[in-house]
Image (tube, coloured by chain):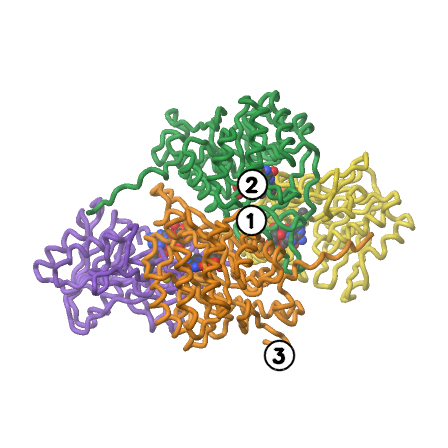
Chain colours: A orange, B green, C yellow, D purple
Amino acid sequence: MRESTFDFSTTLGSAWFPAPVFTASGCASSGRELSQFFPLDSIGAVVTKSVMLKERLGRPTPRMAETPSGMLNSIGLQGPGIDAFLAKDVPWLVENNARVIVSIAGETVDEYGVLARRLRSVPGISAVEVNISCPNVDNRGLVFACDPESAKAVVDSVRRTLAGDLPIIVKLSPDVTNIAAIAKIVVDAGADALALINTLLGMVINTETMFPHLGGKTGGLSGPAIRPVAVRAIYQVHEALPTVPILGMGGVRTGRDAFEMILAGASGVSVGTASFGNPSAVIQVQNELETLLMSKGFNSVREAIGFAHRPAPGPSST
Amino acid sequence: MRESTFDFSTTLGSAWFPAPVFTASGCASSGRELSQFFPLDSIGAVVTKSVMLKERLGRPTPRMAETPSGMLNSIGLQGPGIDAFLAKDVPWLVENNARVIVSIAGETVDEYGVLARRLRSVPGISAVEVNISCPNVDNRGLVFACDPESAKAVVDSVRRTLAGDLPIIVKLSPDVTNIAAIAKIVVDAGADALALINTLLGMVINTETMFPHLGGKTGGLSGPAIRPVAVRAIYQVHEALPTVPILGMGGVRTGRDAFEMILAGASGVSVGTASFGNPSAVIQVQNELETLLMSKGFNSVREAIGFAHRPAPGPSST
Amino acid sequence: MGQYHQLLINVGEVVRHCKPGNFVAISVGGENSSLILRRAFAISRVSDRGEYGGTMELIVAPHGSGSRWLCAQEVGNSLDIIAPLGTPFGIPTAPVQALLVGGGYGSAPLFGLAEVLKSRGCRVDMILGASTVAKIYAPIEGKRSVNSLKIFTEDGSTGQMGKVTDLIPGLIADGQVDVIYSCGPMGMLSAISRITQGTDVVHQCAVEEAMACGVGICMTCVLPVRKEDGTISMLRSCIDGPVMDGALVAWELVGKNGMTP
Amino acid sequence: MGQYHQLLINVGEVVRHCKPGNFVAISVGGENSSLILRRAFAISRVSDRGEYGGTMELIVAPHGSGSRWLCAQEVGNSLDIIAPLGTPFGIPTAPVQALLVGGGYGSAPLFGLAEVLKSRGCRVDMILGASTVAKIYAPIEGKRSVNSLKIFTEDGSTGQMGKVTDLIPGLIADGQVDVIYSCGPMGMLSAISRITQGTDVVHQCAVEEAMACGVGICMTCVLPVRKEDGTISMLRSCIDGPVMDGALVAWELVGKNGMTP
Ligand SMILES: Cc1cc2nc3c(=O)[nH]c(=O)nc-3n(C[C@H](O)[C@H](O)[C@H](O)COP(=O)(O)OP(=O)(O)OC[C@H]3O[C@@H](n4cnc5c(N)ncnc54)[C@H](O)[C@@H]3O)c2cc1C
Ligand SMILES: Cc1cc2nc3c(=O)[nH]c(=O)nc-3n(C[C@H](O)[C@H](O)[C@H](O)COP(=O)(O)OP(=O)(O)OC[C@H]3O[C@@H](n4cnc5c(N)ncnc54)[C@H](O)[C@@H]3O)c2cc1C
Ligand SMILES: Cc1cc2nc3c(=O)[nH]c(=O)nc-3n(C[C@H](O)[C@H](O)[C@H](O)COP(=O)(O)O)c2cc1C
Ligand SMILES: Cc1cc2nc3c(=O)[nH]c(=O)nc-3n(C[C@H](O)[C@H](O)[C@H](O)COP(=O)(O)O)c2cc1C
Ligand code: FES
Ligand code: FES
């Protein structure tokens, strides 16, 4: 299918990927489980579940609620902690020839710095995704991505530590008044690329118990329901910062959806919730996207990035 | 069906309504069209399409795009202007015994004041809904609801003009970092009640033309897709301001959905997009809600408002 | 049927109220559908002589999710449908020379219209067009109700190669047309309006704007229409249309920014 | 079938890999569904002697949108299904005295399990319970594969009035139970774990937590399980379960805030 003249590769900062479709953080665990459904080295990269410094049990169940064309989750960043993660998960991915983007999440600015330091010398990592936008951590008051000062501080800290060793992708929350402004701040602080968007804060009330359904009360809304918000965020940020690469995500389920995000300005696309309904979603989206790009006459992914921003054709009649 | 002991009425500030289900602004035109499907006096109230000072043609077509469990609209506040509206639409609604909530939208702070003045002496109006959150007006930079200072200024201006003659319901946008903070500001400025939520800003790109699909590029996302965001906003604002009545809306399609919003803290519920798929949605939601409230043992709407905020039961086992 | 599906729907008494140019709005996708809006379809023909009372015929092009779902329904399935909707074609009180012009599935409502016009003593000529033969909708029995039928395809795969509009100026110049009834893509409708401009020919066109509600409450389906004083109104094509006076539609403003009343 | 629907699904070769305790994940709502997550169902029985090769039986309670859609499917419809999933019941290598306890549709996988245990020479007693007779699932032919079957309903509408747990302490005290296999509501499973605590009886329970993915990638389906050192892990019930060692599940922490590893 792939013709020799068609270039399906993409870049995020200094990181190169043979294809532009990725898993989404938290929607592929550490990659192993999905490898039953497709070879991990065939997709752009595996973005791992946000890892924290220490082991974390996360939120109580119920942790999910299905909503119209979407779902809420309140996992609360359950995970093994950075040491166990680096000892077990990364080596397995590297052995299996997967490109790896490690997502990190901290409870404090310093923690992000410490996490970044641990990653510096680890072989086989393509980039770091800095999750400053998880709405599930206990201190909601301190969602880094919603506060320009803390967002900047986190990126500063990671930037200083990594010093150019690995590209830094900063993942933003859509739950802000002006996402382009936050984007500009984190790019000025040293982000090489942006990941857009994390989940929207939502809630479902169980009408039987008449209490919030989720153990964590609120949860993150994902899935096709949020795609129009994601496309808008990507479009706005690409318009404001046309040279900054964007990893787009939020409700992508088909090649058409991935194509839409690339037209809006994404250099790569992550598939999250769609994998829950269809464990082969990532590879299917990637194959459909390739076919679609070629059928539209593009010679590369690059040509299509932000194509929807080109000037509109003039009036055809006078 | 309705038992004499069950009180289905509700209030928003000093305005009383025999039932708690309303149309949503912009989703019932001026009421007339829906009256073919149910008698307008049987529902709580008709909230009219936001009216501006002057006649307005609105945005170019296409003005809508269907999205998963939702839709985008970019109407751009097309309307006849306040004079024609007061001459034609309000008298018709009053004649048909509908309770009327007039939604107003201005391009400047002063315009809101002027609009409010026109409403003061009009007979048959129950309340004013101040739409400070429409994301479709041309100067996106100036969405009042996203800027605390302008939000306050608008409410000040309306408050001064109406001077207690009519309850003021201020309608907020979910596209803000902290909706409870904005809610507090407008209540301090004199809002008697809040309407939550307006549409989320979204975009669809037409993958055929490879341009934004809507004539206005971005549009407002509504429908079931956004319900979890609406419930969250209502819950947060009710938690922060438990005495301020809320008119809830965003994706309500069934009695269960309306009940969910009341449990979260809404005193009344507007049905918008659901009417497009089912022109009898408003009356159906209202009937289902009444049955549901009674079957759960509530004696009034009042008892159920914010019920999901009650303390959780203690652990059943030790 | 070429690329089209013919749907026969049992609607009972409702057929009595259906006039050529009316449309219906149908829920698609079933009970848990993520498609929340109805789809509009022109009523092609109605009959009240069906086995179970009134039936209605729709001509559906399987295009996107909603129409494909509809075309996949099996005989006997029930549909959630609102009908009839919209302003129908105006029928002249005296016999006239009528030219019916259809593009693609736009010809669907024209055959029912032709029958009514014939019964009023009108002369009915019809021109149908499409990009290619598979997109021409022209049922055999439909030909009985017209005096003449010409077919155009852009690729010449059937009928003449060319566009429906090619013949119209000549027919008008020859005085063979009093009223044009048209239904099809917006480009075709506006082209016909340009042709009739400055002539005495009345142009009744059935427009097709994306509709969210179909009943007049959402304002998504509007078209710029010139009022008598020359100013512009945005009229709802679902209730003030779909049939509109082609001479009044401000075609050059459709989809344009910065309109003022 | 009382309140339950019995679904027979043709799955071909797959049946060879299905063991008692495995489950399947099915897409619901059709092509344009707003229900984006699969629904999990325990495999009740499999047979490879069907007309078209292997078939699988599910017992479905029509509860919400997804299960109702599934129960409304007609014979011949095809389903999007992933199978088998999860860790099945452990089968003892030597004959033991097994007690199988099922609540509601939780009894579905127990009959297939009973057959396997019998074939290994085990003694198999079964206790089923539900709130009322319509919620008891106990197919006639199933009775053949057990040595004894007792039924409890809370309202006494069939069998004895009471709960499945009423008899268990006595059976354990009498030395009639080596292993308990259970499937049903979480309350029932935790009650059985309390009963077996401090005894030698092994408790293999099939848990049911809400699952978004069913394949181990989402972390929604976790349960607090005690490790050897007494600390807590949150294990995924879709891949580390649904069958878990009841003695290790920290039932008192399920759904509780503020857990630490
Ligand atoms: C008054 C009227 C009469 C119509 N009559 C017919 C008919 O007789 N036969 C027929 O096949 N179709 C007809 N259509 C078009 C039909 O309503 C659907 O738009 C079309 O079937 C595509 O829907 P979909 O769900 O398959 O595609 P999708 O692309 O999935 O539709 C997505 C959304 O866009 C809207 N949309 C997409 N294309 C169009 C279009 N060309 N015009 C208007 N809205 C569009 C749909 O209504 C829907 O809300 C008519 C439309 C209108 C407004
Ligand atoms: C391992 C496992 C085995 C199961 N086996 C069976 C079976 O054999 N027969 C059967 O009838 N049902 C079984 N269920 C429950 C089934 O998966 C559905 O949850 C149930 O049918 C309700 O789905 P719904 O769409 O009808 O309801 P909805 O209320 O619309 O479901 C909404 C969401 O909540 C989840 N959910 C709702 N109730 C439950 C519940 N009790 N447990 C877990 N998730 C829930 C659903 O999966 C869905 O994602 C099993 C669940 C699990 C996890
Ligand atoms: C169950 C679940 C867990 C998630 N965990 C993380 C996480 O650990 N870190 C993170 O940055 N994003 C996390 N996300 C957000 C996704 O990476 C993604 O940004 C979002 O879900 C939108 O994409 P989607 O609609 O394709 O899922 C999670 C999402 C889901 C549904
Ligand atoms: C077509 C359309 C037009 C709307 N026009 C207005 C408006 O004029 N003023 C306003 O305050 N809200 C307007 N809204 C927002 C709705 O009133 C409502 O807040 C929103 O759609 C969420 O509710 P829903 O999901 O039930 O539609 C409009 C929404 C739609 C879909
Ligand atoms: S389709 Fe809603 S007003 Fe015409
Ligand atoms: S259901 Fe997703 S990890 Fe278990």
Ligand 5 occupies quarter: top right
Q: Chain of mark 3?
A: A
Task: Return the residue nearer the eye: D163 or A168.
Answer: A168
Query: Do dots 3 and 1 share one subunit?
Result: yes
| Residue B127 x/y as whole percent | 54, 27
**Hey, what amino acid is under mark 1?**
Asn
Q: Do the residues bearing badges 1 and 2 touch, measured as CB atoms within 8 Å? A: no
Residue designated by label 2: B147
Q: Residue A13's mark?
A: none
- Amino acid carrying label 2: it is Asp
Q: Is residue B142 left or right of D206 when viewed as pictured? A: right
In the image, residue C154 lies at what x, y percent?
A: 78, 63
Residue that carries the numbered disc 1 in the rendered image: A178
Marks 3 and 2 sit apart, C-alpha to C-alpha, by 52 Å
Looking at the image, which is closer to me, D169 or A122?
Answer: A122
Q: Is residue D146 above or below residue B136?
A: below
Image mark 2: chain: B
Q: Do labels 3 and 2 touch, CB within 8 Å?
A: no
* Res. C214 visible in picture: no
At a point 28% along the width and 41% down the height, the residue shown is: B313
Mark 3 and mark 1: span between their CA atoms? 42 Å
At 74% from the left and 59% from the top, the residue drawn is C130
User: Which labelled disc corresponds to residue A4?
Assistant: 3
Distance between the Cα atoms at labels 1 and 2?
Answer: 10 Å
What SS does tag 3 mark?
loop
- Most extreme residue toward the right is C174
The answer to the question of whether label 3 and label 1 lie on touching residues, with beta carbons closer than 8 A, is no
Determine if marks 3 and 2 fall on one subunit. Answer: no
Residue at position x 56%, y 60% in the image: A257
Q: Is residue A284 above or below residue B135?
A: below
**Identity of the amino acid at label 3?**
Ser
